[in-house]
Image: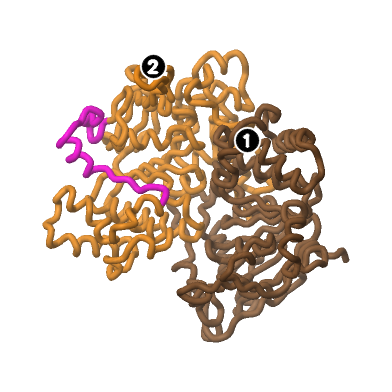
Chain colours: A orange, B brown
Amino acid sequence: MSVEVTERAEPQPTDGRRPLVRVRGLRKYFPITRGIIFQKHIGDVRAVDGVDLDIHQGETLGLVGETGCGKSTLARVIMRLYDATAGTVEFEGEDITKLRGGDLRAHRRNMQMIFQDPFASLNPRKTIGSIIGDPYRLHATVPKNKIKREVQELMELVGLNPEHYNRYPYEFSGGQRQRIGVARSLALRPKLIVCDEPVSALDVSIQAQILNLLEDLQKEFNLTFLFIAHDLSVVKHVSDRVAVMYLGKVVEMASGPTLYRNPKHPYTGALLSAVTVPDPRLAAKKKRIILEGDVPSPIDPPSGCRFHPRCPNAQFPRCSDEEPELRPHHSGQVAACHFPLEDRAVIDESAGV
Amino acid sequence: MPEPLLEVKDLSVHFKTEDGLVKAVDGVSFSIMPGEALGVVGESGSGKSVTFLTVMGLTQTAKNAVVEGQILFQGEDLLKVPKEEMREFRGRRISMIFQDPMTSLHPLYKVGYQLSEAIRSHQKVSKSEAMEQSIEMLRRVGIPKPDERVRQYPHEFSGGMRQRAMIAMAISLNPDLLIADEPTTALDVTVQAQILDLIGRLKSEFNAAVVIITHDMGVVAEHCDNIQVMYAGRIAETGARDVIYYQSHHPYTWGLLDSIPRLSETDSHERLNPIKGLPPSLIFVPSGCSFHPRCPYAFDRCTAEVPLLLPSDGMHAAACHLPIADKERIFQERMLARS
């Protein structure tokens, strides 16, 4: 599948530059085995099952989907924290799925990650200074006697008090810890930062502070973000383009406003309609598409379109037999659906206050 | 005028710690009518959970807790009820759903056992009758094949299903008051919508009063009649839902409303307008209005004098020194800036 899909139309930025990250036919299966000594391979968890994706220089690509849809696995394969089962990840034109040893370590400088849980992602026994300074020590990009100054500059940049250099993580609140995580990810001046649910553990007011910080840093350092979250309103706010994942596949990709005004895939529509609207009058006008049940098991995904057992628009037998391809739509996105939604917004904008 | 179901009068919950006295809840008064859905909103550490844990009788047991005030439930002061009798209230007349469905169920007992145990501890029924009831409750909260599910362990349930099981447990004794503490924070948006719908439906079905505690102004917009905004252990503003969203009189509420990215914004990358700074320490609460260090409109009086929760009209009340005319003007400006 990876061969014929490479030429597929996708929303491209107008300048036609080569993407920073180019993902083609990417699969990541986790084997399920039985037995202790003679491990028998009895199946696979198909966490990522054929994903094509471009991330362009300087943009924010949002990735949304329910728990278990493979969005974090995809990010970790791109980060080379997992090895791909099949497919390629090109970073600036170079296939990184085969990099090993020193080449891989050198490459890691280009990509950093901000994690979801600011309480678990910082070592409680290390000072903030040493946590943020570790990348310098590991990659030796800065002479040892200058590390402290660099770290304090980073701390200031992300809105932490540089005098807190010698404090421990427990002395900071959730939002401040997430700033520490951001500072650490910036240390090596990476080209790509993967943000895996960076704000979902935070209070809304602190969420907004971190989102603003990320946008400022992106402008200042020309960063490229892969932004993963399950909250569509957050993703739409930060992203230039949004990819919606369901059971290991991208089912729709578009710019945020297009996706919101005109979702084509019924799953996107359902996700949009599930987002809570902080405005009672608007909320009352929302068209609700309540999805029944949970996401099916990625061990044995449904035949045809993977969404068909939960889809309110599924028509049989086509949806259960034939797997839909990502196809371009005139409204400017690609979506993988046999019977896409009609042109309409899930929330009537004219009803605004 | 019907009697309120729950009336909290001047409730304070302080904890003595080595670092000082933590004023988790500091003089809170409110009431809930039968069948009402109240949304309680605020950041971590605003006292919203502690208030309702106290209503459940769960903070008083801590040795370092100092609880003052009155909690009248159907006219009876829960703070004076002896521990043993409190069990009669807890679970049967007031019940609570907790935030984390992953840790609120016992991992070593089957779901059916845990549900029927709750029933059997309050009603004289046989094991098999309790199990029948458990199956029926699971069916009501929308769990498919409940007769098979009761024989499973919590790890066999997904997050959304565990939260449904918790709700089933909470409503199985038909309580008059259901407290849901961040019931959907740990869940996906699609499951969140299902759970909120379920709570809303149960409210009308059982005519129970519901309290939804959350930090997300979006969650309460659809399912609550009234909203109470808490900050640093006190009530900052309280009123009917639409009043809070469209005529709010407190800068903290404005900040909460402005902090949320909205799907309807046409331009992505629009800057959010967060509340600056962090919630205060509850040991060293700022003088005067506890919100003044973060408030862009604070003036002299705010640092000196604690604002009272003064009703402006009907049940709408806000604890803020700004003159009403200014509040109305600023709120209108901010609403316009948002849309």
Q: Residue at x 29, y 26 (%)?
A: A88
Q: Amino acid at mark 1?
A: Lys
Q: Residue at x 15, y 37 (%)?
A: A102
Residue A292 percent location from the top left of the image: 64, 31
Identify which residue, A351 or B190, lies in the foreground: B190
Q: Total of numbered circles in the picture?
A: 2
Q: Is residue A100 magenta?
A: yes
Residue B333 percent location from the top left of the image: 57, 67
Identify which residue, B68 or A180, lies in the foreground: B68
Tell me, for residue B46, which label it has, or none: none
Residue A322 percent location from the top left of the image: 52, 14
Residue matched to label 2: A40
Which class describes the residues within 10 Å of circle 2: few (<14), some (14-19), or many (20+)?
few
Circle 2 sits in a helix, a strand or a loop, which is it? strand
Q: Residue at x 51, y 37 (%)?
A: A66
Q: Amino acid at mark 2?
A: Lys
Residue B332 in sight: no
Tell me, for residue B110, which label it has, or none: 1
Residue B154 sits above or below residue B42 on the image: above
**Badge 2 sits on which subunit?**
A
**Badge 1 sits on which subunit?**
B
Residue B111 percent location from the top left of the image: 64, 37
Residue range of the region highlighted in magenta in the rendering:
A90-117
Q: Residue at x 70, y 65 (%)?
A: B239
